[in-house]
Image: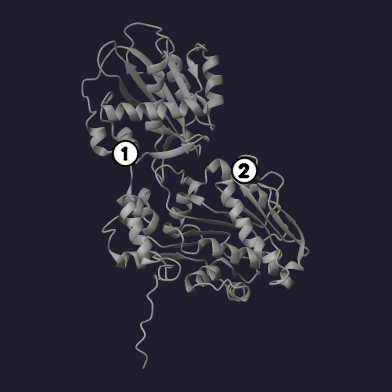
Amino acid sequence: MSSRRTARRGRQEPRFALAPESAYSDGPDAVDLAASYGLVPDPWQAAVLAAWLGRGPDDRFTATSCGLSVPRQNGKNALIEMRELYGMCVIGERVLHTAHEVKTARKAFVRICGFFDDARRYPELAAMVAGIRRTNGQEAILLTNGASVEFSARSRSASRGFTADVVVFDEAQELTDEQQDAIFSTMAAAPLGNRQAIYTGTPPSENSPGEVFARVRRDAWRGEDGRLAWHEWSVDAIGDVSDRERWYETNPGLGIRLSEDFTMAELMRLSEDGFARERLGWWASAGGRAVITAAQWAALLERRPPKEGRTAFGVKFSVDGASVALAAAIRPKAGKPHVELVEARPAGDGMAWLAQRLIEAKGRAAAIVIDGRSGTDALVAALHEGKVSRKAIVVPGTRGVIASATMLYDAVRRKAVTHYGQRTLDAAALAARKRTIGHDGGWGFGSDGDADITPIEAASLAYWGAMTTRRNPGKGTRISL
């Protein structure tokens, strides 16, 4: 009997796994192909590949969307390479590999290109090459069987002209709805008619959008999407970050490509929540990192708000077009500004009630700030027809939305604003998360779940309007409608 101690390695089974039923899987073949070129999968990588490449009786993929959340440096990029290598060489797929940054996309290209431009080591792969495009930002590998993999950093227009069977969203924690909307259509005319979207990444930080990745995760945990595969190594709370047992539970590559020494170095240098997110896979949004805490919001309660002052209204249509909220803010000559929710309704109730209320208030509204693609144009037209002053109507645009959120957030932190304690507004304020907007690090209020946060968004628009407008159409203006 050998006395040699077997090296310990991280847990190969995820904390949570979801995969559609399949008749068979190409996973074992993909494993064999990868291994033949030196990419020997860990057990966890082989299991994920089996789920991603599962097929139904019709030979189509049973998982049309695939998600992977695993801490950094565990082998995620190698897994993507295995999937792309098999897809190109065996299935003949056209793959679009997207990343948040140009340098990340470039790095992925260089890694997989090494299999196709080395005729001495991999002659059969080199023989399949029809062309390799190395132009920075336009990297691609084209094969003689019609397959290809093209690499692109995500932007509004970066995917124009692409047609893909498979789209890989690497660094998915940075993926925004706007970017996904622009890219997803590349699969509309998928040459093989067997589409698959792959989302891989780590839990979003407070400075990451995370809106798409969090939504895919939520759908997985609810089990509502029968065509979704999801694998996640994570903890449900920060807990004891120094507990090495938890390190092994959440890092399948620990003991293989990660070491305890390096993990300890991370622990010494990172913040507690940063270590929990980056190394333990903790989803802060799942536990709830609120932009506004319950204590901060409770400290602003005012049962006797100001009755007169410069008044502005804020209207927010939800991103999905399902709801709309109307809020008001009053800025008195002395004392703190005050925000209130006037009304929030489903979009199905129509817009007549909203337009009528604002038209009735036109004589005392210093500003009416309106945001949301689903209803802004129609409401503005209705207000124009109702003879509301064009100078009073403000459509803030990206910069204005960012300014409104950050201005209200700052006022909350400084205790420089009050509210009346309305249940719907309270719930929205406490459910709000940061959502990246634009390309310069700006943010607005967002949600990582089903919570309707339009009331706090409307309140921020109203507050911004009251604090920035120079109009003061009437004295004695009251906040109520």
Q: Amino acid at mark 2?
A: Ala
| Residue 326 visible from this viewpoint | no
Tell me, for residue 430, which label it has, or none: 1
Q: Amino acid at mark 1?
A: Leu
Give coordinates of residue 366: x percent, y percent.
Answer: 41, 13
Q: Which residue is mark 2?
A: 182
Q: Residue at x 42, y 57 (%)?
A: 222
Image quadrant for the C terminus?
top left
Label 2 crowd bin: few (<14), some (14–19), many (20+), radius 10 Å: some
Give coordinates of residue 234: x percent, y percent.
Answer: 38, 60
Q: Is residue 464 above or below residue 132?
A: above
| Residue 29 visible from this viewpoint | yes
Q: Is residue 407 above or below residue 267?
A: above
Count all numbered tags in the image, as a single digit: 2
Pointers 1 and 2 in contact (CB under 8 A)?
no
Question: Which is more toward the observer, 423 or 428?
Answer: 428
Q: Residue at x 56, y 46 (%)?
A: 101
